[in-house]
Every structure is written in C-alpha cells, then in structure tokens.
Amino acid sequence: MSRATVGERFAQTVRFSAESIRAFADVVGDTNPLHHDEAVAARSRFGGLIASGTHSSALLLGLTASHFSRTAQPLGLEFHVHFHHAVHAGDTLELAWTVTRVQPKPSLGGDLVWLEGQARNQRGDVALAATATLLVTDRAE
C-alpha cells in the first residue's frame, strides 16, 4: 500500500483577515503590535497589519497532517521554514506541498516522506517556503 507518492501535490487556500490575524496572535501569546494595532502597523515598514510568522507557518505545516491523516498516520519529524514576504491583512495564500521523495522504513513501520512546500499570495509572491520530513504509517484501526 502506498502511503505517499513522489509528485503528489496537495493544497489549500486561506484568507488572512485582520480578525483572524489578531485572534491567532492572541491564542499563541504573540503581543507584537504589528499583529494587533492598526495605527502602529500602518507606521511600520509593512504599512499595515501583518500575520505572525507562527500563523502562516502553522497553517502550512498543519496541512501535511490534515492531508496524510485522511488515509494514514503522519508524524512530523522535521520542518524548515524560510520567510520571504510578510502576509498582510486581506492577503489570500495558496498553501501547497509536493512529495519529493519516499523511502520505506520498515524499522519504523512506515515510510519516510520528504516534501517541499510554499505559501504564495494572490499576487504570486512566495510568502514562505518550507521543507519537511514525515514518517507516514498505516492508521491504527
């Protein structure tokens, strides 16, 4: 049974409203005014409210678990994230991952799966790029 296939791609589109940016920052305890205060954010280099890196990266990383847990049991082993552009209130990101390598790992009871991902805004700019390594095993029934 194939748990992942090289070239497999999965994606999700997410809109970042000012309200969702503030709410996420509150939940994770990020008090940076760039995520809460319109006036402070407007005077910043970004010209307005921006999402925390934790927010955009959490959604991208979480997509791997959501995708693979439909048919298997994923376990994130390693993620690397590189931030390219701020995510502004009102931005819409396409979060996408592509499986680049799969290696059976019988000693761990599954497959090691390597992925490359990115979040691209509505203008086509890459806001963040990432790589990941997951262990994907059969679901416990």
Image: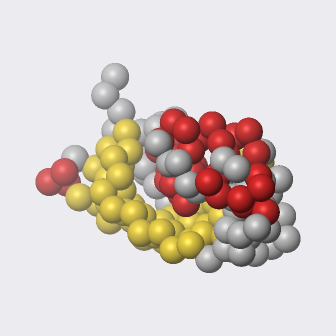
Q: Is residue 139 above or below residue 133?
A: above
Q: Residue 92: in sight, yes or no?
A: no
Question: Picture coordinates of residue 114 (x, y %)?
Answer: 41, 66
Question: Picture coordinates of residue 127 (x, y %)?
Answer: 66, 70
Residue visible at 14% across and 54% down in the picture? 107
Q: Is residue 68 left or right of residue 135?
A: right
Q: Is residue 125 above or below residue 109?
A: below
Question: Picture coordinates of residue 77 (x, y %)?
Answer: 30, 57
Q: Is residue 14 above or below residue 40?
A: above
How many labels were placed on the picture?
A: 0
Query: In the picture, which quadrant includes the C terminus?
Result: top left
Residue visible at 76% across and 67% down in the picture? 43
Q: Residue 100: in sight, yes or no?
A: yes
Q: Residue lying furthest left in this view?
A: 107
Residue visible at 22% across and 47% down in the picture? 109
Question: Picture coordinates of residue 40 (x, y %)?
Answer: 71, 59
User: In this orientation, which residue lies closer to the viewer: 111 or 82?
Assistant: 82
Residue visible at 47% across and 42% down in the picture? 28
Q: Residue lying furthest top in this view?
A: 141
Q: Is residue 8 left or right of residue 114?
A: right
